[in-house]
Image (spheres, helix red, strand yellow):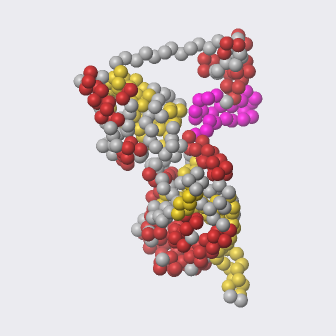
C-alpha cells in the first residue's frame, strides 16, 4: 500500500511550517515515531514523527520550503497491506486522539506512542508527478536571468500570456520567494535580503494584532531593592551549589503573581463580542525570552504557588529549552500575564507591547546604583526601573498604579514574599 502522510494541523492556529531539515531519503526504512523532518512553525522548531512503519517512497518539499497544513510530506510504502485493510490502516492513523496530535515536540517529549493525525485521502495506488512548466520569456529576459543566476522557470511573468519580462527577472533577483536564502542586489553589495522566518512572521502578526486591538497605556516607576540584593547575595551561592541560579527575575515573577491575586483586572481578558470580562483565577507568568531565532514566551504555570527557589529552577529550565530550540507548544500555552526583561542587554525604560489578549506586560530595565533618600539621609541605593503597559480598556489608571505599587512593595521588602 502507498500512503501519503500530510503535514497535520497541530493546533494553536498554525497553518504552515518551514522544512528545516530532512531526516529521511527515498528508500529509507522508518518505524512509527522515527523523525521524518524538522519543521519550524510560528512558535517552535519540532521534529515530525512518522505515523507508520514502512519505506519512504517519496518525499515532498525541499529544505527551506514552506509547507501548509494538508500538504503532502512523505509517501510511505507499507508492506502487506492492501484493499479494505489499507483503508482501515489509514483510519487508525486518523483516530489518534487530539491531545497526542496537538502537542508536537522532539521525540523525547512526544514519545514513540505519539503519532500525528493524517488524512484518509492519503491512501492511493499510484501517483502522477506533473513536469515543471517552462517559462515563456523574452530573449532579453533570458539573457539577464542567466547573468544574474536566476532560474527563469521560477519567475512569475507579468507580460502578455504570462511572459517573463526583464523587469520580472530583476524583481525576482532582489526578492525571490524561496525561504531562508540570502540574496544580494546587482548593485555591488548595497543590500542583503533575507526571507522572514516563521517565528519572525508570527512576532510581526502578534505585535500588529496587539496594537490594533488593545488600548495601550504605560506607567513608569523605580523601586529601591537593596534589601532584595542582600537576601539574594546571602542565598545565591548555596543554591548555585544545588544547580539553581537565583536571579532578580525569580523574585519579580513571584511578586507579580502575588500582585495579580490582589488586582484581578490585570489578570483578565476582554471578550468584546460576547460582552464579557474574563477574570482568571490562575496565575501563569510568561517570560519573554530572546533567542537567535526571535522572541519566544515560555510560561511558568501557577507561579503564585511556587517558591522563589522553584521559580528560579523553572526559569533556568525554560531558558535552556528556548536557547536550544526545544520548547514545545505546551511550554508556551496558557499565559495570563507577561514579563519582559531587557535590562541585562541595555535600557532603563520601555513601552513594552502587550502579549494580546492579556491585560498587561511588565518591562524590567537595567539595575543601577543611584543616590537615594533613606529616612532623612542620602545614601547609595540599588534602583530597578519598571515599565508597566496595560490594556486601558480593561485596567483603569487607578488599578494600574495600585498594581505597580503592590509589586514595588514586595520587591522593596522581599521577606513579605514568604508570607503570601
Residue 287 image point, x, y percent: 54, 59
Quadrant assignment, res 75: top left
User: On the rendered structure, is 335 left or right of 205?
Assistant: left
**Is residue 22 or residue 277 the one in the foreground?**
277
- Toward the front, the furthest residue is 275
Q: Residue at x 45, y 16 (%)?
A: 129
Q: Residue at x 67, y 51 (%)?
A: 211
User: On the rendered structure, is 161 left or right of 265?
Assistant: right
Q: Residue at x 41, y 38 (%)?
A: 48
Residue 333 image point, x, y percent: 48, 53
Quarter of the figure with the N terminus: top left
Q: Residue at x 63, y 18 (%)?
A: 152
Q: Determine the main secondary structure of the stretch shown in magenta.
A: loop
Q: So how many labels did they put on this image?
A: 0
Give the residues drawn in magenta, as a range. 176-197
* Residue 31 shows in this picture: no
Q: From what the image shows, is residue 217 above or below residue 85? A: below
Q: From what the image shows, is residue 230 above or below residue 196? A: below
- Toward the top, the furthest residue is 139
Verify whether residue 67 appears in magenta.
Answer: no
Residue 53 image point, x, y percent: 29, 32
Residue 105 image point, x, y percent: 42, 45
Q: From what the image shows, is residue 82 above or below residue 179? A: above
**Is residue 145 or residue 10 the one in the foreground?**
10
- Toward the bottom, the furthest residue is 376
Q: From what the image shows, is residue 217 above or below residue 90? A: below
Quadrant assignment, res 348: bottom right
**Is residue 242 or residue 289 the one in the foreground?**
289
- Toward the left, the furthest residue is 80
* Residue 204 shows in this picture: yes
Amino acid at each position: 500500500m502507498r500512503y501519503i502522510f500530510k503535514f497535520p494541523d497541530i493546533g494553536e492556529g498554525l497553518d504552515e511550517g518551514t522544512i528545516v531539515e530532512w531526516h529521511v531519503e527515498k528508500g529509507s526504512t522508518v518505524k512509527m515515531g522515527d523523525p521524518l523532518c524538522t519543521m519550524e512553525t510560528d512558535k517552535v522548531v519540532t521534529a515530525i514523527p512518522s505515523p507508520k512503519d514502512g519505506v519512504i517512497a517519496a518525499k515532498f518539499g525541499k529544505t527551506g520550503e514552506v509547507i501548509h497544513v494538508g500538504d503532502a510530506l512523505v509517501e510511505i510504502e507499507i508492506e502487506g497491506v492492501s484493499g479494505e485493510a489499507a483503508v482501515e490502516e489509514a483510519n487508525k492513523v486518523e483516530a489518534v486522539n487530539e491531545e497526542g496530535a496537538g502537542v508536537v515536540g522532539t521525540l523525547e517529549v512526544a514519545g514513540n506512542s505519539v503519532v500525528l493525525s493524517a488524512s484518509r485521502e492519503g491512501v492511493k495506488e499510484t501517483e502522477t508527478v506533473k513536469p515543471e512548466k517552462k517559462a515563456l520569456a523574452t530573449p532579453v529576459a533570458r539573457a539577464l536571468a542567466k547573468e544574474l543566476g536566476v532560474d527563469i522557470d521560477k519567475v512569475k511573468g507579468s507580460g502578455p500570456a504570462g511572459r517573463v519580462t526583464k523587469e520580472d527577472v530583476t524583481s525576482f533577483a532582489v526578492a525571490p520567494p524561496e525561504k531562508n536564502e540570502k540574496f544580494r542586489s546587482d548593485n555591488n553589495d548595497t543590500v542583503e535580503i533575507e526571507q522572514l522566518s516563521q517565528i519572525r512572521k508570527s512576532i510581526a502578526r502578534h505585535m500588529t494584532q496587539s496594537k490594533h486591538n488593545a488600548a495601550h497605556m504605560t506607567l513608569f516607576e523605580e523601586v529601591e531593592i537593596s534589601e532584595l540584593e542582600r537576601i539574594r547575595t546571602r542565598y545565591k551561592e548555596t543554591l548555585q551549589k544545588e544547580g539553581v541560579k537565583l536571579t532578580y527575575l525569580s523574585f519579580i515573577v513571584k511578586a507579580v503573581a502575588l500582585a495579580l491575586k490582589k488586582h484581578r483586572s490585570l489578570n483578565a481578558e476582554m471578550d468584546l463580542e460576547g460582552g464579557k470580562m474574563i477574570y482568571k483565577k490562575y496565575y501563569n507568568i510568561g517570560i519573554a525570552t530572546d533567542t537567535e531565532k526571535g522572541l519566544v514566551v515560555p510560561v511558568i504555570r501557577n507561579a503564585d504557588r511556587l517558591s522563589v527557589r522553584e521559580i528560579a529552577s523553572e526559569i533556568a529550565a525554560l531558558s535552556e529549552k528556548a536557547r536550544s530550540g526545544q520548547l514545545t507548544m505546551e511550554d508556551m500555552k496558557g499565559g495570563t500575564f507577561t514579563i519582559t526583561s531587557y535590562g541585562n542587554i541595555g535600557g532603563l525604560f520601555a513601552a513594552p507591547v502587550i502579549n494580546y489578549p492579556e491585560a498587561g506586560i511588565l518591562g524590567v530595565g537595567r539595575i543601577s546604583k543611584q543616590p537615594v533618600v533613606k529616612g532623612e539621609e542620602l545614601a547609595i541605593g540599588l534602583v530597578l526601573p519598571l515599565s508597566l503597559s496595560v490594556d486601558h480598556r480593561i485596567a483603569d489608571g487607578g488599578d494600574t498604579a495600585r498594581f505597580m505599587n503592590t509589586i514595588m512593595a514586595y520587591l522593596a521588602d522581599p521577606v513579605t514574599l514568604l508570607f503570601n
